[in-house]
Image: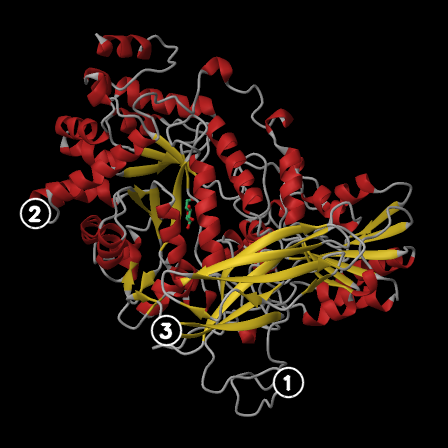
Amino acid sequence: MKKVMFQAILFSGFIVSGSHPVLAALPPNVARHKAEFVENLINQMTVKEKIGQLRQRFVSSEMPEAEVLQAITDGQIGAMFGSAPRPVSRVLQDAAVRQSRLKIPLFFGFDVIHGHRTIFPINLALASTWDMDAIALSGRIAAKEASADGLDMTFAPMVDIGRDPRWGRVSEGFGEDTYLVSRIARVVVNAFQGSTLSASDSIMACVKHFALYGAVEGGRDYNNVDMSSARMYQEYLPPYRAALDAGAGSVMIALNSINGIPANSNTWLLQNLLRKEWGFEGLTISDHGAVAELIEHGVGRTGKEAAQLAMVSGINMSMSDTFYAQELPGLLKSGGVTQQQIDNAVRRVLGAKYDMGLFEDPYRRIGIASEDPADINAESRLHRAQAREVARKTLVLLKNEKGRLPLKKDGVIALIGPLAKSGVDIMGSWSASGVASQSVTIYDGLKKAMNNGSLIYARGANLTEDQEVVKYLGASEIENDSRSSAEMIDEAVRVAKQADVVIAVVGEPRSMSHEAASRTSLDLPGRQSELITALYATGKPLVLLLMNGRPLSIGKEQKLADAVLETWYSGTEGGNAVADVVFGDYNPSGKLPTTFPRSVGQIPNYYSHLNTGRPYLPGGPRNYTSQYFDQSPGPLYPFGYGLSYTDFSLSEITLSTQILKSNKSVDASITVRNIGKRDGETVVQLYIRDVVASISRPVKELKNFQKILLKAGEEKTVRFSIDESDLKFFNAQLEYVAEPGEFRVQIGLDSQNVKEQSFELL
Ligand code: BGC
C-alpha cells in the first residue's frame, strides 16, 4: 500500500516527497533501522547497479546531458559533484528515483569551503578569529545556503595541517597548529551537519584530505609525504580524528602518497587506521580522479590494477570515475576483487544516503519546483550582516606604530593597489557559488564608511607581469593594466601626494593561493614592493592592507609602513569589515594561526618545533646554534600574534599546585588587564612544554585558549585547568602516555611573549 503511494507521488510529475519503496515496505519500526534497510536493498541489486553506486560524476549547470541521464537511469551513477541549479538537480534526481530500477536517490556534493552564496573569509582567516562561535556561524549559514540549493554534502572541512606557505592550499586550511585545527574541525563538522544529518538544512561533512596532504614535500602540490609515525600521530592526524569523532559522515582520500604508498591504495591508512583503530563507519571518497592516478603514482600498470588497488584498500566511491565502471565487473569475475569488498563499499554509500535522509525524501534539499528561487543570486538569499560580523573578527593587526590606525573618516585618503577594487579576489579561492559583483571591495567599503572625506584611487601596479604566470593562473583571474609599471607607480605617487594618508592594498590574486598554485617565493608578486617604496618616499603616513592566502615575507615592506593589517580574503562583506577596522568601528582581535617567516628560506618555521641539541636562544650567541647565519633568527610574526587598538597587561601565572598527581588537575590562572583607552578582545593562550621525556618534545604546544572582551581599564582572571590528558603524547612505541617530570606552563597573548611557571607530574 505504502509502495503504491510512493509511486503515485513519484509519478505525479510534481514530486514532493515519499519514502523509498524498500523503506516504505518495511514495518515502521524496522524501516528506521539503517542496517536492515541497506541489506535489503543490496540484496536486490545487480552487480552493475552496485558498481554504479560507487561512482561520482561531475554536474554543471549545462546539464543534464542525455548520456548522463541515461547512465543514472541505468543505475550507473551514485552521486553527482559540482554545482547546478535546483531544476537541473531535480531532473537528475528524477532519473534516479523515477526511472532507475531500484529508485536509489543520488546525492549531490560540492566544495562549500568558506560559505556558499554568501562568501565568508577563507579558512585561514576564520582560524584567525580563535572564535568558535563565529566559525560555527559561518559553517551553519554555509549549510543552510548550500542545502537550499539542493546540496547534500560538502567536501569540507579541509583540516590538513599547513606548515609550508609555498603550498597554495594553506589558504583552505586552518593553519599550522594541531590543537587549534582540531578544535575548529569539530566545530565546523557540527555546524555543517546540524543537530541531525537528515534535516533539510544539514549537509554531510566530507573531511579532507586524508591524510597528511598539508605536508607535501617542498610545499609542491600533489607531492609525496614522508613522515615518521610519531609525527603523524602527534601532529598531523588529530584534526581528521577530531572531525570524525564529531560525526563527519564521510572522508575524502588525499592525492598524495604517504611514505611511498599512495593514500588511495594505502591499506594501512584506509583499513588499519581509519576503520580498525578509529572505528570509522562512514563513506570514503577518492579525490578527483585519484583512482586513475594510481597509474602515474607507479603502483598499478593499468586501469584494472588501479581499480583493484583502490577497491581492495578501501576506496568506497570514486570521484570522476572511469575505472570502477570499466574494470570492477571483470575484476569481480576473475577474483581480483571480492563480492564482499564491493558490497562493503555499496553499504557505505547507501548508509550515507540513508543518513542524509534521502531514502525518506530524495528531494529533501532540492525542494519543490514551485519553491525554486526565481533568482538564485538574489540579495535576499545572502547573509550579509553575519558575514560582516565574522569577517571583521578575522583581521589581524600586525603593526601599528604611534597608533596610526584607526583612521579618521574625513580628510583625503589615497587608496592604492591592484587588489583594492577587486571583487573577485576578495572572495578567495574555492568561493563556491559566490558572485564577484556582490562582494564589497575594499574601495567600496572605505568609500561608504567615510563621512565628508574623499577617497582617491590609483592602481599602482599589476599583480604579475610575467605572461607565463598570467597564462597559468588564467587570464580571467588576472586583469592586467596595459600601462608600464613606471607609469602606474608615477600615477600612484601623484595621487598619494594629494592625500593625508595612503592605504596600499597589496598581496596576491586569489588564484595564487589555490590548488596547484605552489610558489617558490613568498614575496609580494609583481612590482608591489617597488610601489610601496615609492609611496613611502612621499613621506605620507602609510598603511598596508594585506590581501593574501598564505604568510608572506614582507619584512622589508612592513618596515616602511606605519601600520599593517592582514585582511586575508575576507569574502562578500570584506570591504565593509575592513572599513570597520580601519576606521575603528571594530577593534581588531585576530591572532595569526600560522607563523609568518622572514623569508622562504626559513621554511619550515612553525612555533612548536623541537629544541635541538644546539638551540638558538634570543639574545644569546648565534655561532654553532641551530639558525641561519644570514638572517635574523625567529619568525617575522609568531603564531598567535595580533595587536589591538588597546593594550593589555598580564600578571604572573599562579598555579594551584606545583605537584600534579594523576587523576587530579592543576589550575593555571593569569590576570589580564586592559590598560588602554578602548574596549577590546584578546586571546589568552596556554602553551605547555614537557621538559624531559622519552623522546624530544616541542618547545611549546598550544593546549587551550580563551578569547575575552575587556572594557577599557577592566581586568579579568583567566583560569585553565590542566590534567594528565593535556600532557599526553605518542611515544616511540606509539603509546599515548603522560610521562612524569617537569612541565612548563606558558601563558601569553601570542606564542612568543609568554609568562612561565612549572609543575611536576608525579
Ligand atoms: C580537490 C578537492 C576537491 C575536489 C572536487 C580536487 O581537485 O583536491 O579538494 O574537493 O577537487 O572539487
Percent across and percent down for residue 344 are 18, 41
Question: From the viewer's perspective, is residue 354 above or below residue 154?
Answer: above
What element does badge 1 sit on? loop
Res 737 label? none
Label whose residue precedes the other's in the sequence (1 or 3): 1
Query: Which mark lies nearer to you, 2 or 1?
Result: 1
Question: From the viewer's perspective, is residue 715 above or below residue 367?
Answer: below
Dot 3 alpha-carbon crowd within 10 angstroms: few under 14, some 14 to 19, many 20 or more: some
Marks 2 and 3, how far apart at CA: 53 Å
Residue tagged 1: 619
Left-right relation of 330 to 603: left
Percent across and percent down for residue 417 are 75, 55
Marks 2 and 1, how far apart at CA: 67 Å
Dot 2 alpha-carbon crowd within 10 angstroms: few under 14, some 14 to 19, many 20 or more: few
Question: Which residue type carries mark 2?
Answer: Gly
Q: Quadrant of residue 754?
A: bottom right
- Which residue appears at 59% of the width and 36% of the height? 118
Residue tagged 2: 335
Left-right relation of 200 to 566: left
Label whose residue precedes the other's in the sequence (2 or 1): 2
Q: Quadrant of the C terminus?
A: bottom left
Percent across and percent down for residue 710 are 70, 51
Query: Which mark lies nearer to you, 1 or 3?
Result: 3
- Which residue appears at 40% of the width and 77% of the height? 696
Q: Quadrant of the N terminus?
A: top left
Question: Which residue type carries mark 1?
Answer: Gly
Dot 1 alpha-carbon crowd within 10 angstroms: few under 14, some 14 to 19, many 20 or more: few
Residue 1 visible in rendering: yes
Q: Quadrant of residue 340?
A: top left
What element does badge 2 sit on? loop
Question: Which residue type carries mark 3?
Answer: Pro
Res 740 label? 3
